[in-house]
Amino acid sequence: TTTRPLALEVTGLRVEFDGFVAVRDVDLTVPAGELRFLIGPNGAGKTTVIDALTGLVRGTGTARFDGHELLGRPVHRLVRAGIGRTFQTASVFEGHTVLQNLDIAAGLHRRPTTLLRRRRGVPEEVLRALDTVGLDDLADRPAGELAHGQKQWLEIGMLLVQDARLLLLDEPVAGMSGEERAATGELLRRISRDRTVVVVEHDMEFLRNYADTVTVMHRGSILAEGGVDEVQSDPRVIEVYLGA
Ligand code: ADP
């Protein structure tokens, strides 16, 4: 086996809210091309880690992605460095079609409506993203009419057209049906082939089928890390999950 290059390397991450330490001493290394799940009971600090890496909250320590320091950078710089994230509630432009949403995200031209009337004017990466997230058939549907799961897929597609190479996804399968979950799991595997993907997740059964590595957080710190079986049989993890 060859060693993959490091993609995300976080050391000593700490986040405080008015004296309350929400994240402490977090070291997290995610190799390029890995599908990593970040799990832990409610309040463990998972979302706060992602918030710190995407400039929504102030964190101290270091967080490098492909050589770029992420902490303390404004959001637009992070986007340019290839960092993309989704939220638990998908934020898409509901009144615009799926295609227009992708087009807006791509930001490739100033007058999308003119171009969108001619399908052949649609940029290649937009068509590719449509295909990757499986929304081809719904390209002309207003995003507001999409099912919950489809909105999450559209949001992931919007990150793909922005050429995000580190995707931080906050509970993407929350509220999804079993079928949507499976489709999302396959999608995550596909996109993680040439990107680095960190998924905050609660459901151990879901991640069992898809995770390369699982990092378990508890009370702001990392409690355990390893393969799904390894982590699931770790007495400390069992205790935290049963006690939660
Ligand atoms: P998780 O995502 O693992 O459920 P969070 O990262 O959302 O956990 O929260 C970690 C801790 O930080 C919780 O105790 C939460 O109440 C606290 N917290 C999160 N955001 C804020 C904030 N903006 N202000 C104060 N406390 C916060």
Image: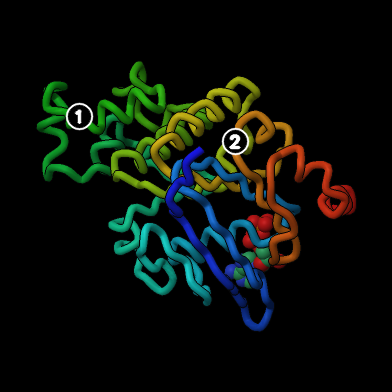
Amino acid marked by disc 1: Glu
Closer to viewer: mark 2 or mark 1: 1
Crowding near the residue tagged with mark 1, few <14, some 14–19, many ≥20 C-alpha atoms within 10 Å: few
Note whether residue 43 is visible.
no
Q: Which mark is residue 124?
A: 1
Relative to 206, say whether 241 is above or below: below
The way the protein has been coloured in the rendering is rainbow
State the residue at coordinates (59%, 44%).
171
Q: Disc 2 vs disc 1: Cβ atoms closer than 8 Å?
A: no
In the rendered image, the vertical position of residue 81 relative to residue 99, given as above or below = below
Is residue 213 shown to the viewer in this render?
A: yes
Residue 165 image position (x, y, % from top left): 37, 47
Residue at 52 percent of width and 52 percent of height: 30
Name the image quarter holding residue 180. Answer: top right
Check the image and report above or below for 4 versus 141. below
Q: Quadrant of ligand 1?
A: bottom right
Circle 2 crowding by C-alpha within 10 Å: few under 14, some 14–19, many from 20: many
Q: Which residue is mark 2?
A: 173
